Amino acid sequence: MTEVADAVETPQQAARRLAAASLAQGFNPEALHTYTSPSGEPLFWRLRLKHPQTGDKRIFPMWRDASGRFVMKEPPAPPSGKPLYRLHELAERPGDVVLIFEGEKAADASASAAALPPPAAAPAAPPAPTGHRSKAAGF
């Protein structure tokens, strides 16, 4: 890919390009999880693929290197440590209780559940955040 093409490549296009070998082996894209800064700027992504027959899953990190090109490898951790998934949503609600989950899929499921109407005796749940990942159709 040329430098000009890389400058306009979307995360979804990069995910398909970088996961081409796994896709050719029959893996299907499940999600493209976006890790953000507290202000909402994308920092890096995690590609999640699953094989429909075997159930095997593959999760790959992806980020833009210093040249702006998407690469499939773990980004360098900042001195403050790696950010939490959905960090910008946490930053928007500093007084809320935070639940920590193992894996993006579990965090997304919890956020989706928060959008369901609460039982009559429970306090109202906050609205579910949006824009945090791309489903398989977009990746």
Image (cartoon, grey):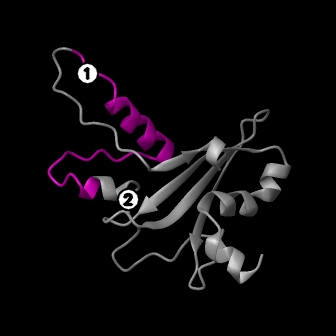
Q: In terms of secondary structure, where does tag 2 sit?
A: loop
Residue type marked 2: Leu
Residue 71 forms part of the magenta stretch: no
What residue do we see at 24% from left, 36% from top? 126
User: Where does the image place residue 21, in percent across and percent down from the top left?
Assistant: 82, 57
- Give the extent of the magenta segment: 90-119
Residue 54, image quadrant? top right
Q: Is residue 53 above or below residue 12?
A: above
What residue do we see at 31% from left, 53% from top? 89
Residue 114, image quadrant? top left
Q: Earlier in the sequence, mark 1 or mark 2?
A: 2
User: Where does the image place residue 5, in percent across and percent down from the top left?
Assistant: 71, 75
User: In the visual, does 40 lie left or right of 17?
Assistant: left
Of the pair 10 and 71, the residue shown nearer to us: 10
Circle on res. 118: 1
User: In the visual, does 114 lie left or right of 47?
Assistant: left
Q: In terms of secondary structure, where does tag 1 sit?
A: loop
Q: Is residue 20 above or below residue 102?
A: below
Q: Label 2, on which residue?
A: 84
User: Where does the image place residue 137, in percent across and percent down from the top left?
Assistant: 65, 42
What residue do we see at 56% from left, 57% from top? 46
What residue do we see at 19% from left, 14% from top? 120
